[in-house]
Every structure is written in C-alpha cells, then in structure tokens.
Image (cartoon, rainbow, N blue to C red):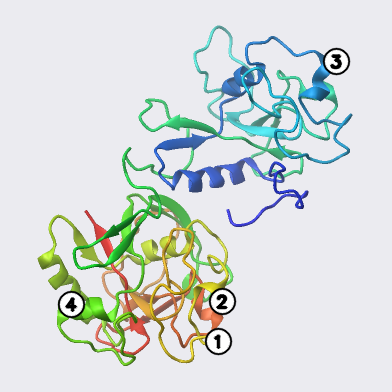
Amino acid sequence: MGDSPSKFENCEQCPVENVSWDDAQTFIDRLNGLNDGFIYRLPTEAEWEYAARAGTTEPSKDNLTEFGWHDVNSNKSTHPVGQLKPNAWGLYDMQGNLWEWVQDWYGDFGAGAQTDPSGPISGTERTIRGGSWNSPFQAARVAVRLGWVSTSRQSTWGFRVARTAKSSTTDNSSTSTRPAPSGQPRAGTSWRSPQGIDFVYVPAGSFDMGSVDGEADEKPVHRVIISQGFYLGKTEVTQAQWKAVMGANPSKNQGDDLPVEQVSWDDVQEFIRRLNAQSNGVIYRLPTEAEWEYACRAGTTGRYAGDLEAMAWYLSNSGSATHPVGQKQPNAWGLYDLYGNVGEWVQDWYGSYREGEQTDPKRESSGPGRALRGGTFRSRAELLRSSFRGFNTPDSRFSPYGFRLARTP
C-alpha cells in the first residue's frame, strides 16, 4: 500500500490497525493484482471460527493470556505478532491483539447444518472477530461476534488474509480485480523481444485514475479496471533500438543508450508497423493512457510511485539533457524512467475523462492531439505526477518526446 495507517506506528512487526473493511479489500485487490497463482481474500466467519477453535470447543479462560493480548496483559497497546502461544493448528493471535475483519455481513446465523456458509447476503455492517488489546478477556472468546460499518477505522481493528488456489471452484473474493488465468506471469516478469527490447509484465487489476488535487483534466477520479495483463517496455525505446528498425536516428541528444526523441506520434506508428511486420505471434503497440498510469503507479496512490529524485531525470537534476535509460530506480514493478527523461506518447486521443467505473476504457475517437505522459527532462516536479497529462498534435516532433512500447499476445 505504500504507507501505514496504524496508530501504533513504531513497531513494524505489530499488526496493521486503523484499517476499515473497505481498506482491507483495497489491500486484497492489489495483492491479487500480483497474479501469483492464488486468490487472496478475507476468511468467511465460519472459516475464521473453525480455524480459531482448531478442533477444540472453547479454551479455558484461566490461560487465555498465554494465547492473546487483551486488557489484562497488553499495557494498552498492540504487540508484535507471533509472540504468544499458537493454537493447535499453529495460528497466532486469534484471540486478542486486534479484532479481525472477516468477509461476511453481520447477521443472525441460519438454522440447521451448513456447508461452508457464506453468511447473510446483505446487511449494514461487516463482522469482526477475536477481541483486541483493549478488550476484556470475555470478548476474546472464539464465539464472540461484533458488527461495524465497512468504512469504520479503529486502532483495535485489523485482519488476516485467507488464500485459495485459482484452480479452486470456490472464489469468495469480493474485489474488483479480474485474476489472470493460472500460469500467467507474475508482476515484473521480464521478456525480451528478438530486437532486444526488454519488457516487464503488468498484471490485470484496478486502480483510481486521475487526481483530486491535480489539473482540471485529471478529474474526476474514476475507477478503471485493467481486465487483461500485458507487457510494457522496461525502459523508453532507445536510439539503438530505433535505428535497428528505422535505419536512422532523429534524436537531438545522440547516444545509443539514450531514449530516442524528436519523434512524433505518427513516426512511432511507422516504427510499430515495421516492428510488427517482423514479429511472430505478438503485437506491439503504444499503451493506452489508462494502462500507462496503472503501470506507473504500480499499486501506489500518491503523487509519485516513490522518491522522485531517485526515480527521475527532470529539471532539477538532468542538466537540460536526456540520460541513458535504466540508470534511476525502477518502480515496484521494475519499470524505469516513467517519470522524466522524455515525455511518452500513448495511444489515446487527448480528451476529458468520463464518470464511473470503466473497464479498459474506450478511447476518444478524435481530439486536439494525442496524449503524452510522464513529463520530461525539462519538467518541474509537479509536472511529473503519475496522473499528469499532456498532449500535442500527432505530427509534432520535439526533443523531449519519446515513447515506450506495450506488447499484446
């Protein structure tokens, strides 16, 4: 997630707290976006209690302090996970330390035997289980249940995740991520084209596109679903790679390992046309604007995906020139130079965002120009935000303009 909301913030091994049920779903959504062969989710209420009991009926109140932190032994604080005794199945802190969000709506139990019950199908509150550092020991009993609205945050609430194989027929996930089929690459997996262009796999997932405090064209913030994973160039296309396909180098700042620049959107389309004529089974293209921002953010939500000085060549450190690709720090998915160096053409026409959730949003069919992303070596820091948008006419050639490729099977 990039940061911690916890009240008890000076303990990295303590459980994360001050998170709502909705926050837990966002965490799970991003975790599932890594596509590692499993589906992560919250446990159902039945699963949680079954695991907490671990074959017992109810642990003795006399020894509960051996298994959990509550108001008798916690000193009014969380404690590092796994310090007390585990239950019979090796699970720690099921009773105390933090209440744990589970998947279910809070409601009455149904009558009769149930097989993997999913709980009520609707309600006004989500269920929490297990007691906390602030609870009397009676509240840490495995049968105790509470309900709270899904947006609530308190320093006594956290969660643990359950994991299901993607081959399973049961998927209790409630996130908006569309997990990729089993066997798809993990985020950051590399692939090299026959022409020597390195790509990084970007998993399917969803994110909030735009910014509430940005320019007018960065609003409204809207949810976008990237329904299929894709490969994106690890770096901007270099001058050596351009020359190998096009035979000449239009760049003002010359150097084989520098990004190619002074190329128009139309020039890039000709490069792609020739590259695709040489390919076998893959299609090269520019990323859409949504794909570019999703890959740039790499699961982050702030203005930048990391320390800008460490990640970008821009006005304050570039010396008014481009620099060899891949020298700065990459983002969390292994992509370099998304901020600065050269502005990157994307596929879309520049236009206004539309309200509402979008799945790989359809691009504008026309506009004042083609969109540019990422800022340049001449840009101020505020023009390098993940959400910042520029544009120019498709035939424009300037030394700050370059591109990176996307690859589709």
Instruction: Please identify the residue farthest to the left as the structure is shown.
Output: 277
Residue linked to disc 2: 309
Closer to the N terminus: mark 3 or mark 1?
3
Q: Which residue is drawn at 31% across and 85% down?
A: 261
C-alpha separation, residue under disc 2 versus residue under disc 1: 9 Å
Label ID, residue 244: 4
Residue placed most toward the observer, 183 or 211: 183
Q: Which residue is drawn at 78% across and 48% down?
A: 8
Closer to the N terminus: mark 3 or mark 4?
3
Q: Which residue is drawn at 51% across and 72% down?
A: 311
Asked which secondary structure carries label 1, the reply is loop
Location of residue 38 (image quadrant): top left
Q: Relative to 98, say whether 137 is above or below.
A: above
Q: Callout 2 environment at 10 Å: few (<14), some (14 to 19), or many (20+)? A: some
Closer to the N terminus: mark 2 or mark 1?
2
Closer to the N terminus: mark 2 or mark 3?
3
Residue linked to disc 1: 316
Tag 2: residue type?
Answer: Glu
